[in-house]
Amino acid sequence: MSTVASAAGAAGAPGDPGDIPQARRRRGGVVWSILRSRPQAAIGGGVILLTILVAVFAPFIAPYGPREKVGPPFAPPSSEFPLGLDDGGIDMLSLIIYGSRVSLIVGFAAAAVAMLIGGTIGILAGYFGGKSDVALMRVTDYFLVIPDVPLMIVIAAIWGRSLTNIIIIIGVIYWTGTARIIRAQVKSVRERVYVRRAQALGASDSRIIFRHVLPQVAPLLVANTVLTVAVAIFAETALAFLGLGDPSLISWGRLIENAFVSNAISVDAWWAIAPPGIAVAVVILACTLLGTAIEDALNPRLRVGHLSVRRFRLRPMPSKEAS
Amino acid sequence: MSAPVLEVQGLHVWFELERGGELHAVQGVDFSLQPGERFGLVGESGCGKTTTILALMGLLPPSASVAGRVLLDGEDLLARGEETVSPHRWTDIAMVFQGAMNAFNPVKRIGDQIAEPMKLHGVSDGRAARQHVGELLERVGIPATRTSSFPHEFSGGMRQRAAIAMALACEPKVLLADEPTTALDVMVQAQILQLLVELADDFDLTLVLVTHDLPIVAQVCPRAAVMYAGEIVEIGMTDTLYHDPRHPYARLLFAATPDLSGDSEVVSIPGTPPRLDREIAGCPFAPRCDRTFAPCGTVKPRLLTTGPGHAAACHLNDPALKAAS
Amino acid sequence: MSVNGTPLLEVENLVTHFPVPRGVVGAMSGKPKRVVRAVDGVSFALREGEMLALVGESGSGKTTTAQTILRLVKPESGTVRFEGEDISSVSGRRLRALRHRVQLIFQDPYESLDPRFRVQATIEEPLLVHGEGGRRAEREERVRDALTRAGLTPPELYLDRYPHELSGGQRQRVAIAASLVLDPKLLVADEPVSMLDVSIRAGILALLDDLRRGGLAILMITHDLSTVAHFADRIAVMYLGRIVEEGPAREVIAEPRHPYTRALVSVVPRRDPRAAADAQILRGETPNPVAIPPGCRFHPRCPIAIPECKTIDPELRAPAGARAGHLAACIRA
């Protein structure tokens, strides 16, 4: 590609693009390129995707219905029922499959609520600074300080145990981490020269926030949301286990609670207890892998500078080619 | 002329690229320095000047591979890599890095930071080191009472002086200074340059001044080399470089530099430097050159002697080639 | 010159202070409020088609002066008149109108463009912000026009590029194009070439010079006297918040009348190794603008200071024998 032009008198305009310095165009955005280059992100993402598919296609995948009695209570795993039956004679495998729906719905929805609240507060506090920042951060601190589980118990007790309430409760408790991280990022983006330029231009604050700040902050927001999904799923599991979940819905936490209440332990029915727990753990792990991978990639890495490690390699002199 | 204190022979540096392939950052650099000499290494961004002096100190990352010889008083520093370089690092050859004034540890006192290399290299310790640090600071123009100050209590100019003091902590023979005055005000720059010249004279120090700023080199260094695309394209007395340049890039670079006298017109050089991750056919400067002729596109020029102590890598200096075209 | 002969920009006795925070303890213990007198009484005028360089070292107040003129910072006192209108305290619509006619170019071409905006979007933004340019096709036309004026031809080659695909010089041209698209009257350029390679600086400066010839007024902030010598019409040398010398660029540099200017000019390195070097290197560094010396603010470092200099604060006036328009603030000039 290196062209060898003749005398520079014929060279193009001073802004000649001929030799544009090497830079790769990012295809499809930052997050995608991270997914492609890190195995942990791919694994995490893959597992989450799989779980979503299981949840969506549950009626087609599950061998039996979620309330279909197909055998004696606590029947152990067999070739017919790979994960055995619960206290009501219902197939555990089907229950796990159907249970993924509520767990994921709550997880994603609550994380979305948390992201909306936390992201908005973080952006406003970081961008406007000053008194609004102080006020918003005080509010954040209050929410941070209140212990999550007791608060959830109290609110669930007062408001009732519907699915919507659970989602809102979890979202409202867990937005604080997002707010702080986004605020820090927004504060630094705000100082970038191109933002100052937009201000000098007379652009409105909302324009600057939506067009200049938000795109810079979005990948971090994505990473943080993924991590919040993990927290939300766990919170739902805990709430359900404590009996605060919607009684008419099947979720993994509810399955664990059911096993506990029906004393599965006393009959050594591990298949009623362990699988839902493992399912929760696997999904949370997947979210964590994906979220931390994105976060790591977004942090300015400590680049191995020329001053740190001195293990350069030696090579023989290149042979003088006849030029 | 005595034996050279530093001789660089056929220095090459390659960097592995993340996406595969290599960047040939330094492509066969040769020069030698007399003791007490002040030598300028000039070039624009990406020409390889910083990589060259880092290679002299053996301060390259694992992605780098190096070929060539660097003879310090006859001993090849690169013979066995880190093993042969580290005994000489700082004690015989030291460096003031680009942006050194901002690289101080903010929570340690200046005096302690300057004493650190003395302790590390066994030059002096404890009270002797403190004494030595005080003397060193005075020598670079900082009152010894400021030994216990923190970096943020110093102005930019003072921090740069402290960085120079740190480089001289183990009394090296060769001092490499990478853009020592770039972020400084004009007056402070003048002070620092004056300091460097005095130190070079007093300590019989060999100074290598790496910069993109030609006028500084014109003022401080009697001899200099101009680098482009990883190679030295012209080397010789600075006076000749200005008054009788033999490489178009050297000539154009001077012409592109505004001068206070404001008389001649300032030119710009169209185009951009070539990519160094692929082989370049012919002269690397040819695409931007105003005096190309037949061989420039295909034949790579070698450094040809154009006068006593002066050489340039340009076919225009080759009578044989000129006659043929 | 504008129609009725008034200069485009008139600055009179501009003062901008920044308070130094005392902290809770300081406030409670009654420590006096300290103030950074970044701009301490600056006056100058700029006409259409003229390039004035504000020159000074760090702490001189040149950047703050520019920021105050652009109303990015509020002045303490003094007036700034643009096209005859006092803009020192306007806000709202008037301020937006100002932003339309006065544009700013930043020093760092690597940071002044949003990395996620293509060139097209960056240059189009000012039009969108100010609600100009009607239909899309019309806006595109203006964007192309601006790119061409900035020397990036053919424009089609650049419209779709991201900043990271461009060189430093190209990026700076994009920034210039973005500031030209609204057809401003005044361009404030803050060190427009200091972060670019030497071989491409002249191209950018020549571009600014062309724009100037086309009627644009340019206020250039820089510390580089050599650049000023070639490209500026007039120069104002600042020290600790005041203009200490002002006049035609070539003349001020060839025959400086203020000792600070004289010292500054003498220490600038020359291209020619044979150029005589009788540098007047001043001792120490510019003092902190929090504590400005009494009398002439330069007297502690002045090589020709006399006792009167400690008490008299000199005014900017024409020294004997200097040409018209050349002023210096020194009682010994």
Image: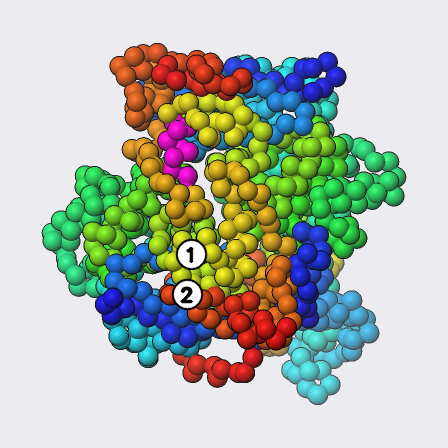
Please state the chain letter of the residue tagged with numbered disc 2 in the rendered image: B
Depicted B189 relative to depicted A293: above or below:
above
Looking at the rendered structure, the secondary structure element under dot 2 is strand
Picture coordinates of residue A15, whole percent (x, y): 68, 52
Residue type for callout 1: Thr
A62 vs A204, nearest the viewer: A204
Magenta segment range? C260-269
The quarter of the picture where residue C93 lies is top right
The answer, for residue C114, to whether it is visible in the render is yes
Tag 1 secondary structure: helix
Report the Cα–Cα distance between label 1 and label 2. Answer: 10 Å
Q: Quadrant of the C terminus of chain A?
A: bottom right
What percent of the width, then of the height, locates residue A44? 62, 69
Q: Earlier along the polypeptide chain: callout 1 or callout 2? A: 1
Q: x and y percent of residue B153 in the render?
A: 31, 38
| C135 displayed left or right of C106 | right
Q: Which residue is mark 2?
A: B307
Q: Residue B240 shows which numbered tag?
A: 1
Please report, as a chain letter, where disc 1 is located: B
Discs 1 and 2 lie in a common subunit: yes
Q: Residue furthest front?
A: B323
